[in-house]
Amino acid sequence: MAVSRNALKKGEKYAPAPSVRPRPPAGVPGAGPPPGTA
């Protein structure tokens, strides 16, 4: 958890987990749920 917290504090320089990475724009096939769903 410490790594995630540090990454977030540094402005998410690197995404520690897939769920933390910015979601792709909605409407893209295979992108998963649109932003705001999760």
Image: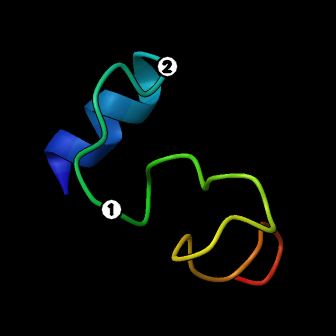
Identify the image quadrant of the N terminus.
Answer: bottom left
Q: In this figure, which residue is indicated by the disc labeled 1?
A: 18
SS category of the residue bearing label 2: loop
Colour convention of the picture: rainbow
Please, is residue 23 above or below residue 2 in the view? below
In this view, the residue in front, 19 or 6, is: 19
Label 2 packing within 10 angstroms: few (<14), some (14-19), many (20+)? few
In which quarter of the view is residue 35 placed?
bottom right
Label 1 packing within 10 angstroms: few (<14), some (14-19), many (20+)? few
Please, is residue 17 above or below residue 31 in the view? above
Identify the image quadrant of the C terminus.
Answer: bottom right
Say whether disc 1 or disc 2 marks the residue closer to the N-terminus.
2
Q: Can you tell which of label 1 and label 2 is closer to the viewer?
A: 1
Amino acid type at mark 1: Pro
In this view, the residue in front, 3 or 16, is: 16
SS category of the residue bearing label 1: loop
Amino acid type at mark 2: Gly
Residue for point 42% across, 66% down: 19
Residue for point 51% across, 77% down: 30
Please, is residue 17 above or below residue 30 in the view? above
Please, is residue 9 above or below residue 38 in the view? above
